[in-house]
Image (cartoon, rainbow, N blue to C red):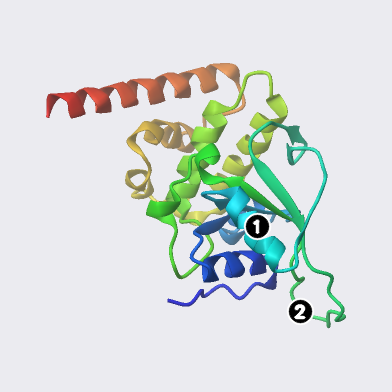
């Protein structure tokens, strides 16, 4: 099945998919698809093996960039490869979408996203529920000494709740992992999400849910 996404900004995804490499756009590009009026910066792409994906883009004219390991303004040590697109000689006409930009390849497992299960052959956009699940898990897993990363992830989650109409539907909760449904209900009820007590509560809920699931598996 051919990709339905014709956004030239997402060209590296098209190239990766053409070689059988699963990938989805991430962060601002992903949440913008669901109505969030965010500015997009670098193109973040989730892949299973960033090194292999980078090699393919290098063969297609991309070049490695030397830069800090950052997500937004947050510094972190997770695997990432930043590449510059080939030089574009043509001048963009009025009304045309911008072409490829700096592409940052991230390992999907580092961001709690299952590419094998949730990567559609028809689009590079992650489904809304797995996107939210992955962002919530990444927010809960964020180190206590990296508040900038936590704020960055928390803002994207909050924007989705503000702008994605699907999240206001009564039936949406069942699409989320069970361990995140209480988070969803708490946000929908108007609880403040930017506090330490809220974070600790959600971590505890997730831990209890995972233990219950493991116990159920052992009993079967």
Q: Which mark is residue 122?
A: none
Q: What residue does disc 2 label?
A: 96
Tell me: residue 73, above or below residue 96. Answer: above
Between 164 and 40, the one lying in front of the other is: 40
Between 166 and 120, the one lying in front of the other is: 120
- Give the x, y percent position of residue 179: 37, 32
Q: Residue at x 64, y 35 (%)?
A: 78
Q: Residue at x 60, y 56 (%)?
A: 53
- Give the x, y percent position of residue 30: 59, 55
Q: Residue at x 78, y 37 (%)?
A: 73
SS assignment at label 2: loop
The total of numbered circles placed on residues is 2
Mark before the other along the chain sequence, 2 or 1: 1
Work out which quarter of the rendered image holds the N terminus and state it.
bottom left
Give the Cα separation between the discs numbered 2 and 1: 29 Å
Q: What residue does disc 1 label?
A: 55
- Give the x, y percent position of residue 46: 57, 51
Crowding at mark 2 (Cα within 10 Å: few <14, some 14-19, many 20+) = few
SS assignment at label 1: helix
Asked whether the viewer can see residue 22, the reply is yes
Q: Residue at x 69, y 47 (%)?
A: 81
Q: Nearer the viewer, mark 2 or mark 1?
A: 1
Left/right of residue 19 with respect to residue 73 in the rendered view: left
């Amino acid at each position: 099945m051919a990709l339905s996404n014709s956004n030239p900004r997402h060209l590296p995804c098209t190239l990766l998919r053409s070689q059988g490499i699963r990938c989805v756009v991430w962060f601002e590009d992903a949440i913008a698809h669901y109505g969030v009026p965010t500015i997009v910066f670098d193109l973040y792409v989730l892949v299973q093996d960033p090194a292999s994906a980078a090699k393919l883009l290098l063969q297609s004219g991309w070049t490695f960039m030397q830069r800090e390991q950052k997500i937004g303004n947050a510094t972190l040590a997770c695997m990432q490869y930043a590449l510059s697109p080939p030089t574009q000689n043509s001048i963009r006409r009025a009304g045309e979408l911008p072409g490829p930009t700096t592409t940052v390849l991230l390992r999907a497992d580092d961001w709690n996203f299952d590419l094998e299960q949730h990567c559609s052959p028809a689009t590079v956009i992650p489904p809304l529920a797995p996107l939210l699940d992955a962002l919530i898990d990444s927010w809960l897993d964020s180190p206590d000494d990296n508040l900038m990363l936590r704020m960055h992830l928390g803002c994207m989650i909050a924007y989705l709740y503000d702008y994605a109409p699907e999240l206001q539907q009564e039936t949406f909760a069942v699409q989320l992992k069970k361990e995140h449904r209480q988070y969803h209900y708490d946000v929908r009820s108007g609880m403040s999400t930017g506090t330490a007590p809220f974070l600790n509560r959600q971590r505890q809920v997730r831990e209890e849910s995972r233990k219950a699931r493991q116990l159920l598996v052992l009993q079967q």
